[in-house]
Structure formats: structure tokens, C-alpha cells
């Protein structure tokens, strides 16, 4: 019996070992929050274009450059629906470091979590709310930190949640091109990785060797375990007879 338990634990450790990790930062739940993995996990909201910036960065070797904006909400965004469902309602600390391009001296910008939820008691059946950090003036000379603790709430069920950055339509340069780096989203009071968060599956180039090797490794381990367990059980049965 002890040998069977050991084999099962071996299989479990290998499977867990090849699972992707959402974040190595303590408590930080955004995927690729620092753009060190290109634009994985991020997408454009609206008609803007996202590109990787390697020189004008806040930290590390990469940042996101947002250009071609035709609206204040044309920006970089990350779908955090599964993460917010997992961690639940409550307070979240959100952070982004933002800098305008050289073509725009300053701009008024903020970060927000947009929540779309279903309210079974409402005639509209759906509610949309924004938890924002408030407008902050950013400039083209250095990165400016935008931070706030927001309270996310919904009535019956969460349908969609989005982390994004947008600008103030009432101020100059509301469609400014800007750089974005070192974002974060932390659930206040949550114990980091006390329970594994949902896996984020970003769009990545297909790695043929990885696709072949990881399932094959699991199958080899399982087959080896079964080959060990079943002869052992037959041996015990014959011994009992």
C-alpha cells in the first residue's frame, strides 16, 4: 500500500511541475504584468495598436506602447474574469506605470476594472460598472504611477471583468499615444497562492517539442506506475490464495 501511495505522489508532483504558473510575484494576479513576455495575455480594446517597447521601459526589458487611438477607451486591456471570479468580491489594489510619448507633453489618465454582471432582479438583466483610480496627469519625461484600491461588487453572477487604462476625454491630449509597464492587481487580504489561481492561457507560438514532450512524459510515468501497481496486486492475490 505504501508503494502505491508513493507512486501516486510521484505522478502528482510531475503533473504539477509542468503546469504553467500565473505569476511569480507575491499576490500579483495579472498575467505578464511587466510585459517581459511580449504582449502575452494582453489585447487591444478598440482600434488602437499595441507593440512591444524595448528602450523606454519602467523596469525590466519590455513595456507596451499604445498608438493609433481614436477613442479614450482605445487601450491595452486584460481579461481578468476568471481571476476575479476565483478571488471573489471585495477590495483590490490596482497599479499601472504610464508615460506619454514624446509627441504629447502630458495627458490625464487612469486605470480601471470594468465589471459586467447579471442581476436576476433587474429588468435589464445586466449591469455594467467601473471601479477607477481617478485621473492622474502623466508626462513624456518619466513614468508616473497610478494606483488605487477599488471595491468590486456584483449582485448575482459575474459575466466579465476587464483591467484597462484610459484617458480623460475632457482634457487635452485625450488620445495621446502612451507607454504602459509594471501593472499589478492584488486582492486585499488574500493569502498569495493559498489555493492555486485559475490558469491563464495566453496566445503563444506553438512549441512542437513542448506539445510532444509534456504529454508523453505524463503517459510514460502513468504507464510505469500501472505496470508496477498491477503486478504487485496480482502478487498479493496469489500470496493470499
Image (cartoon, rainbow, N blue to C red):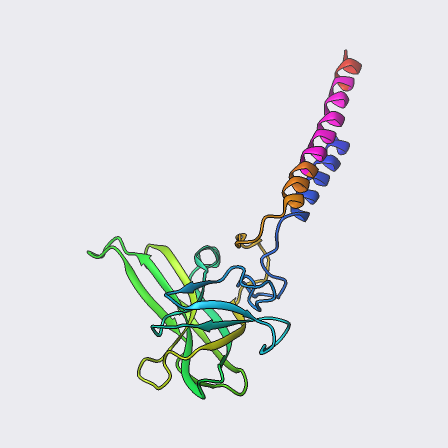
Q: What residue sits 32% from the left and 80% below the top?
A: 169
Residue 218 on image: x %, y %: 67, 37
Above or below for 69 versus 123: below
Of residues 171 and 229, the one nearer the viewer is 171
Residue nearest the observer in this picture, 19 or 120: 19
Looking at the image, can residue 61 be seen? yes
Give the residue at x 61% y 77%: 55
Tell me the quarter of the image containing the C terminus.
Answer: top right
Residue 235, position in %: x, y? 78, 18
Residue at screen point 63% across, 62% down: 24
186 and 176: which is toward the camera: 176
Seen in the picture, residue 201 relative to 62 is either above or below; the reply is above
Q: Is residue 210 magenta?
A: no
Q: Main secondary structure of the magenta part?
A: helix
Dividing the picture into quarters, in which one does residue 132 lie? bottom left
Give residue 149's position: percent from left, percent from top. Answer: 46, 74
Query: Could you tell me which quadrant the N terminus lies in?
Result: top right
The answer to whether residue 188 is visible is no
Which quadrant of the view contains residue 232? top right
Q: Is residue 52 left or right of residue 225?
A: left
Q: Farthest residue in the top direction?
A: 241
Magenta residues (range): 218-235
64 vs 130, left or right, is right
Query: How far across and how far down the image is residue 198, in percent?
Result: 52, 52
Q: Is residue 39 above or below residue 229?
A: below
Q: Does the stretch in magenta take in 230?
A: yes
Amino acid at each position: 500500500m505504501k508503494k502505491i501511495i508513493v507512486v501516486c505522489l510521484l505522478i502528482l508532483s510531475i503533473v504539477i511541475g509542468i503546469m504553467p504558473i500565473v505569476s511569480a510575484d507575491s499576490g500579483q494576479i495579472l498575467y505578464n504584468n511587466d510585459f517581459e513576455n511580449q504582449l502575452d495575455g494582453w489585447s487591444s480594446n478598440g482600434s488602437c495598436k499595441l507593440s512591444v517597447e524595448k528602450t523606454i521601459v519602467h523596469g525590466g526589458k519590455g513595456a507596451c506602447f499604445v498608438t493609433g487611438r481614436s477613442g479614450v477607451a482605445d487601450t491595452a486591456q486584460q481579461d481578468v474574469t476568471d481571476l476575479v471570479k476565483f478571488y471573489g468580491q471585495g477590495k483590490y489594489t490596482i497599479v499601472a506605470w504610464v508615460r506619454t510619448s514624446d509627441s504629447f507633453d502630458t495627458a490625464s489618465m487612469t486605470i480601471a476594472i470594468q465589471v459586467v454582471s447579471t442581476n436576476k432582479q433587474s429588468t435589464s438583466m445586466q449591469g455594467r460598472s467601473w471601479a477607477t483610480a481617478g485621473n492622474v496627469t502623466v508626462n513624456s519625461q518619466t513614468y508616473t504611477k497610478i494606483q488605487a484600491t477599488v471595491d468590486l461588487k456584483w449582485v448575482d453572477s459575474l459575466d466579465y471583468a476587464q483591467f484597462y487604462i484610459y484617458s480623460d476625454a475632457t482634457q487635452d491630449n485625450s488620445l495621446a499615444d502612451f507607454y504602459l509597464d509594471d501593472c499589478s492587481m492584488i486582492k486585499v487580504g488574500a493569502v498569495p497562492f493559498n489555493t492555486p489561481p485559475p490558469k491563464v492561457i495566453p496566445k503563444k507560438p506553438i512549441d512542437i517539442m513542448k506539445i510532444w514532450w509534456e504529454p508523453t512524459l505524463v503517459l510514460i510515468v502513468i504507464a510505469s506506475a500501472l505496470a508496477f501497481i498491477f503486478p504487485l496486486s496480482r502478487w498479493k492475490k496469489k500470496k493470499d490464495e
